[in-house]
């Protein structure tokens, strides 16, 4: 079990630039989640994939945000025209599909985004 | 609000003492989970308790669930400095989608 990996760990960019983050889930997990966490708060749900299908998006995911999981394995989260308020930790999690109660989610260590 | 609310927001204790954190929620649930987050890291799943269970143990962790009071508690016995972290309770309402709702968590500091 190599765990969930996210790249990069840190990203510093100027306001208005586009950024893209990558998440590699645990290989046998077909569910993948993106969360955003600001200082002192718990993670907030952004979006969820089952295999390559994006099944749910939060209202937090404005039209500047787009997520993909083209082959049902790794996922990317892109933020276009970044704003100061986008500064946060972006967390990815994965879990196996469950037939009953939800399975625990396995989190990566996140990508910390800082907008100058 | 659909997230659990942890109490207290911050807890500071000495090594060897027990730490108790509480969680309240406002709706019926399918199960409740506790996660830990070390500073600057991702979250780690600690324990899951189903709605028909009242108590569950895992090592030094003990979780209780009272569905009539819509509350849960996490007890860490014989705490260690390495237990210093934020602790979150999250619950599942039975949706198959699996999204988790997080509160602000309890920041636990264990002094050596």
Image: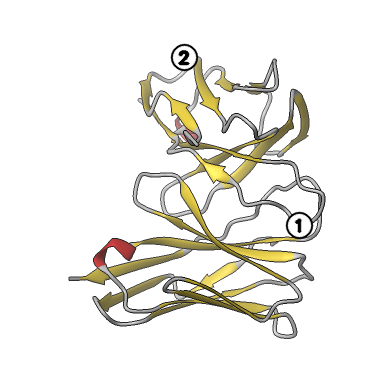
Q: Residue at x 53, y 26 (%)?
A: A23
Nearer the camera: disc 2 or disc 1: 1
Q: CA distance from mark 2 to mark 1?
A: 41 Å
Are callouts 2 and 1 both on one chain? yes
Specify the subunit that label 2 lies on.
A
Q: Residue at x 65, y 23 (%)?
A: A67
Local crowd size for mark 2, using a 10 Å CA cut-off: few (<14), some (14–19), many (≥20): few
Residue A95 at x, y = what percent?
A: 64, 42
Q: Secondary structure at mark 2?
A: loop
Q: Name the one closer to the observer, B85 or A63.
A: B85
Visual colour scheme: secondary structure
Quarter of the rendering containing residue B2: bottom right
Specify the subunit that label 1 lies on.
A
Residue B6 at x, y = what percent?
A: 53, 70
Q: Which residue is mark 2?
A: A17
Q: Name the one closer to the observer, B58 or A102.
A: B58
Q: Secondary structure at mark 1?
A: loop
Q: Residue at x 51, y 53 (%)?
A: A42
- Decide if residue A62 is on the left or right side of residue A22: right
């Amino acid at each position: 079990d190599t765990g969930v990996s996210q790249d990069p760990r840190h990203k510093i960019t100027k306001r208005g630039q586009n950024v893209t983050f990558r998440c590699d889930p645990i290989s046998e997990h077909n569910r993948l989640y993106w969360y955003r966490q600001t200082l002192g708060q718990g993670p907030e749900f952004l979006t969820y994939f089952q295999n390559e299908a994006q099944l749910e998006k939060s209202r937090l995911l404005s039209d500047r945000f787009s997520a993909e999981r083209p082959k049902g394995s790794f996922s990317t989260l892109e933020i276009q025209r970044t704003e100061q308020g986008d500064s946060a930790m972006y967390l990815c999690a994965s879990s196996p599909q469950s037939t009953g109660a939800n399975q625990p989610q396995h989190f990566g260590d996140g990508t910390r985004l800082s907008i100058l | 609000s659909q997230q659990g609310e942890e109490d207290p927001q911050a807890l500071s204790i000495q090594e060897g003492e027990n730490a108790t954190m509480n969680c309240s929620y406002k709706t019926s649930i399918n199960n409740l989970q506790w996660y830990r987050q070390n500073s600057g890291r991702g979250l780690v799943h600690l324990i899951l308790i189903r709605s028909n269970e009242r108590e569950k143990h895992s090592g030094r962790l003990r979780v209780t669930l009272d569905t009539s009071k819509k509350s849960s508690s996490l007890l860490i016995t014989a705490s260690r400095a390495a237990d210093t972290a934020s602790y979150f309770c999250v619950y599942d309402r039975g949706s198959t989608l699996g999204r988790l709702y997080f509160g602000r968590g309890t920041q636990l500091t264990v002094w050596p």
